[in-house]
Amino acid sequence: MRALLTGQQMKEVDRIAIEEIGIPSMVLMERAAMAVADEVIRRSEKREVIWCACGCGNNGADGIAAARILSQAGFHVVIVVAGSTEKGSREFKLQASIAEKLGLNIIEYRDFIPGHCDILVDAVFGVGLSRSVEGEYEQFLRMLHEARPRLTIAVDMPSGISSDSGQVLGCALYANVTVTFGWEKLGTILHPGKGYAGQVVIADIGFPELAFETARKNWTEGGPGEILGFTYGQEDLKRIPLRRAYSNKGTFGKVFVVAGSKNMGGAAYLSGLAAYRTGAGLVKILAAEENRSFLQERLPEAILEPYDSICLSQEPESYRDNLEKACEWADAVVLGPGLGQEEWGEYLVEMILAAACSPVIVDADALNIIAANPHMTGYFTENIIITPHLGEMARLTGETISEIQDDLILTAQEYASRFGITCVLKDAVTIAALRDGRTFFNTSGNSAMAKAGSGDVLTGIMAGLIAQGMDETEGAIMGVYLHGLAGDDYQEEKGQYGMLARELADYVGKVLKDREHF
């Protein structure tokens, strides 16, 4: 697990390291510059022309220091600066003075005559940018873009990208590589910033853990709205429970899938298949009678409990005892994929929410039914996980999709906090807002997974993990991460276009095989 910081949070860590712990700012700056220079040296040749484009703040100071190191290593370096050097930060003026004493020429943008550029070091703005890029700085960024360098390496953040939201603030520069310091920033995780950042290299420049822990305590005490962001890496696969040698099918948990109205058996099949591929011992599927032969042929391992839609609509109470027994039997419940939004679907959703004591993963049509019947949120407890995409979230909240896109993080956090549940908001970067105030940002997955049925597979993965003993929060976020890893493995082997959701479920087993090595 690794933390993800906003720009303001990174500034606080930096302040504590310098002012409270006493690490000289120039020491941190030199190490940052060396990290940037190392990436340039590793990716370039000495015959190439390097532009170090700098602002007049500390990010620009990092850029000048990197230019000095590159020059001393024998590279042809041009330093060009936008903004008022007279109003530059103390560190900027000091780095500029050092560079000039060593014979480097610092050119102000207004006097700069663009020429050939092979490699661009983008040190114009750092993590502190909070308003739209305009005027001279906008002209400067556009000139740098038009230079068409072979390689662009951004210092801490691509210039013009919000370090908090990943939004483009007016205009921005694309980077092939972003060298960020201490911790990755949210702006390089979230779109569109993720697309601007390229490969992100996290450089350890000497921030002590104490500075981070002190700052985190301050954030926690700051109250609601403070983002405590984190993500998972391959090392976190060790969190998944190991398979015990002395065991049976009951050892690895039971999943109850409530899904699949008439002609929608595929959704139930995919959720059940994914639960089995993730390691669940038993899967029971409640689906419409019309899906019986399909499910028995495709997934004979599952226990099938068909229902008659007409009977359920006319006499819903006749099903209550069986549903309550199934919920009591289950260690995890999947509710909603392909369920439909007929009246009998409403009965099923309400009865399951009322009866289930185990974690319930609520998806697809169940979410739409709840949105149309807001009183059902009265059944929400801490064991509820909702997994809406943007359209479903819009129906749940009454907001437009564009309003949600403007602040995905806050939307997920507010909904989770309001009902005390786990909210997994699915997008190109999936965000999970947890009951304890933390927010998970997923870094696995790719566009090959944008296919019908992918969400049904996700619910099955989550249920399979929870059934094996993971708590609902851990199972939800690990399910999102594992789902994305399966997609990444598929893309690496077979490309971006041909994936089917059932193949995604199959690849979960491959990822879990790799887990055995951690």
Image: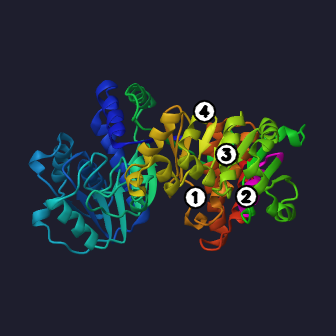
Q: Residue beneath label 3, please?
A: 349
Which element carries disc 3, helix, strand or loop? helix
Judged by depth in the image, the label closer to the viewer, 1 or 2, is 2
Which quadrant would residue 487 be assigned to in this image?
Answer: bottom right
Q: Residue beneath label 4, please?
A: 382
Q: Main secondary structure of the magenta part?
A: helix
Q: Residues within 10 Å of mark 1 (few under 14, many from 20)?
A: many
Answer above or below: position of 291 versus 89.
below
In front of the other: 383 or 119: 383
Tell me the colour scheme of the image. Answer: rainbow
The first of marks 4 and 2 along the sequence is 2
Q: CA distance from mark 1 to mark 2?
A: 26 Å
Q: Residues within 10 Å of mark 4 (few under 14, many from 20)?
A: some
Q: CA distance from mark 4 to mark 1?
A: 27 Å
The first of marks 3 and 4 along the sequence is 3
Q: CA distance from mark 4 to mark 2?
A: 26 Å
Residue 406 screen position, x and y as percent: 37, 52
- Magenta segment boundaries in residue numbering: 266-282
Q: Residue beneath label 2, please?
A: 260
Q: CA distance from mark 3 to mark 4?
A: 17 Å
Judged by depth in the image, the label closer to the viewer, 2 or 3, is 3
Residues at marks 4 and 2 touching, judged by CB atoms closer than 8 Å? no
